[in-house]
Image (tube, rainbow, N blue to C red):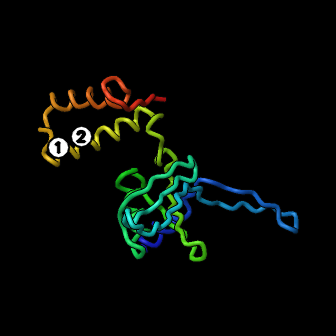
Amino acid sequence: MQNLNQQSATQNDTNYSVKITRNDYRDTQINLNHYKGFKVSYLSPTNHKGVRISITDLRSKKKVIISRGSEDSYRDDAIKYITEELGATVKGFVSDEVLGFYLILIDDFDKGIFNREEMTLDQYHTMRDKEYTNRVKNGKITDTEEKYVQFDKDYFMKLTGAGGSYKAKFI
């Protein structure tokens, strides 16, 4: 019985409410959850490219195309990308079988696809730490404090254009 009560309490946690005046002029309060959405579309293979998935952040209108998945699993691959690469917790999804896409829903509006030319310092730190972890995991860097500090300097210089071709500004 305790699980049922916990589940009910969780279902009642909302982050948005709407006040509606009914036909009998009585007000009704409706509690909802406001989510951030990602449109996920399957891209068929071409002569030069394999199966791809298009993921569009519906708030920022920025898009990323990832090269993985199949027509049967592209929703799950997109959910994996959103959770692992963006660090978001997926709260649900909507399927549009007629137009052939999914909407993946999250409740953290700070997570999403961002333009690497303009990023917050937190976004830079997330991107830097992920890249450092990948390089350590692949044996390209030994994980020491000195190596981390040097990597941070080099990576920052690469992103800002001083010592690299990529120019980012922090907002």
Q: What is the number of the mark on residue 51?
A: none
Question: Are the residues at dot 1 and dot 2 in contact (C-beta closer than 8 Å)?
Answer: yes
The answer for how far apart the CA atoms under marks 1 and 2 are is: 6 Å
Residue found at the far front of this picture: 47
What is the x, y in percent for residue 91?
48, 62
Q: Which residue is mark 1?
A: 136
- SS state under label 1: helix
What is the x, y in percent for residue 121?
41, 32
Nearest the camera: 98 or 44?
Answer: 44
Disc 2 marks a residue whose amino acid type is Tyr
Kindly identify the residue that appears in the image at 26 percent across and 26 percent down: 153
Q: Which residue is mark 2?
A: 132
Please indicate whether residue 129 sits to the left or right of residue 70 in the image. Answer: left
Check the picture and name the quadrant holding the N terminus: bottom left
- When asked about the image quadrant of residue 21, the answer is bottom right
Kindly identify the residue that appears in the image at 16 percent across and 31 percent down: 147
- SS state under label 2: helix
What is the x, y in percent for residue 83?
38, 56
Kindly identify the residue that appears in the image at 49 percent across and 29 percent down: 171
Nearest the camera: 125 or 53?
Answer: 53
Mark 2 Cα within 10 Å, few/some/many (few <14, many 20+)? many
Residue found at the far right of this picture: 24
